[in-house]
Amino acid sequence: MIDALRYFSFIKEIRIKDALDIALVTFLIYRLLLLVRGTRAWRITLGVLGYLLAMLVGEVFKLNTLYWLLEKGSVAGPVALVILFLPELRQGIEEFGRFGGLLQTPIGLAGRPEEMAQARTIEEIVAACAELASESVGALIVIEKSISLEEIVSNGVPLDAAISAPLLGAIFFENNPLHDGAVIVQRDKLAAAACRLPLSESSRLDPNVHMRHRAAVGVTENLDCISVVVSEERGTISVAFEGRLRRLANHLELREFLNRELRGEEKPPKPLKLRRSRGRRAQIKEQKESQS
C-alpha cells in the first residue's frame, strides 16, 4: 500500500497551471475528434494510425525494407495531412472564430442526442416525398445531423423557412428556378435550396444511378447527414446514409427510417395530422399501402 502511494506521489507536484494546461489540451483533442467523427476525415485518421502501426511493427520485428519505405514516405506526411484535412481544418478554425464556440456543450458530451428533429419536421418531409414520388417529380433533401452543413448551405440560395410539404413541393416543381439542386434541412428549418453537392465516385454504386443519387451518396461520404432522394424516372424514394444508398419500398418506410435515425424511435409514431391538402393520387396510394 505504501509503495502504491509513493507511485502516485508525483500528483503533489502538479500545479494548478499544469492541471489547466492538461485540461485545455484534452478538451481541444476532444473537440477535434468530434469534428472529424462521422466524416471522411475519421477514416483518414484511422488510415494514419494504421500507417504508424505498420512503422512500429517494421521497427520492432526488424523489417528493414518495410520500415525504410514507410519512414521515407512519412517525410511528406505533414503536407499530405494538411491537404487531406483541409475542409475539417477550415471548419475547425471557423469554430475557434465563433464567440463561445468552445464553451458550448458539444454533441456527444453526454452521448448522441436522442432527438435531432421534431416529429412534425419528419412528417412534412415524408408527406412531401410521398406527393413528389406519386407525381414522378425529382427531389433531393439533405438533413443535417451532428456535423454542420454550413459550407454547403453557403453555395445555395438561403431560405431560413419553416418546413412544410407544400413549400418542398413548390421548390422541386419543374419550372421553379430552385428545383435543380439540393434542399438543406438544419435545426427543423429549410436553410437553403439549389445547393451543390459533391458527387460520389464509389464503385459500389449501380452504374445506372443518375447524378441526383450520386450527389446524395457523395455528401454522406464526407459529412454526417442523411439524404432523401425521389427519382424522377421511377417515382421511387431512396435514402443515402454513411456512403450507402438504399431504395425504400414506400414513404411509410421513409418515416420509420427517419424516426429511427433522427429521433431514436424504433417504432414509428402515429402520423401527425398536417394542415394541408394531399393530392388525390397520393391519397389513393397511401390508402392502398395501409390496407396491404
Image (spheres, helix red, strand yellow):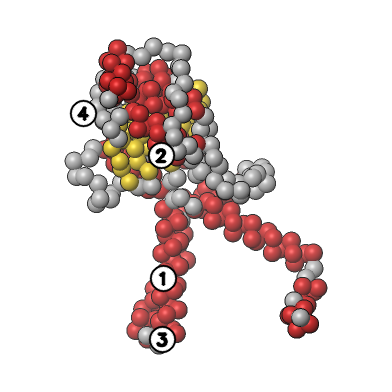
Q: What is the three-letter code of the residue carrying label 4?
A: Glu
Foreground residue among 93 and 285: 285
Q: From the image, tell me which residue sits under label 2.
A: 226
Name the residue at 45% across, 61% down: 45
What's the distance in space between the residues labelled 1 and 3, CA to CA?
16 Å
What's the distance in space between the residues labelled 3 and 4, CA to CA?
58 Å
Q: What is the three-letter code of the residue carrying label 2?
A: Ile
Regarding mark 2 in the picture, which secondary structure is present there? strand
Q: Residues within 10 Å of mark 1 (few under 14, many from 20)?
A: some
What's the distance in space between the residues labelled 4 and 2, CA to CA?
22 Å
Q: From the image, tell me which residue sits under label 1.
A: 51
Q: From the image, tell me which residue sits under label 3.
A: 61
Q: What is the three-letter code of the residue carrying label 1?
A: Tyr
Q: What is the three-letter code of the residue carrying label 3?
A: Phe
Residues at circles 1 and 3 in contact by the CB criterion of under 8 Å: no
Which of the two discs, 3 and 4, labels the residue nearer the N terminus? 3
What's the distance in space between the residues labelled 1 and 2, CA to CA?
31 Å
Residues at circles 3 and 4 in contact by the CB criterion of under 8 Å: no
**Residue 168 placed where, x, y %?**
39, 22
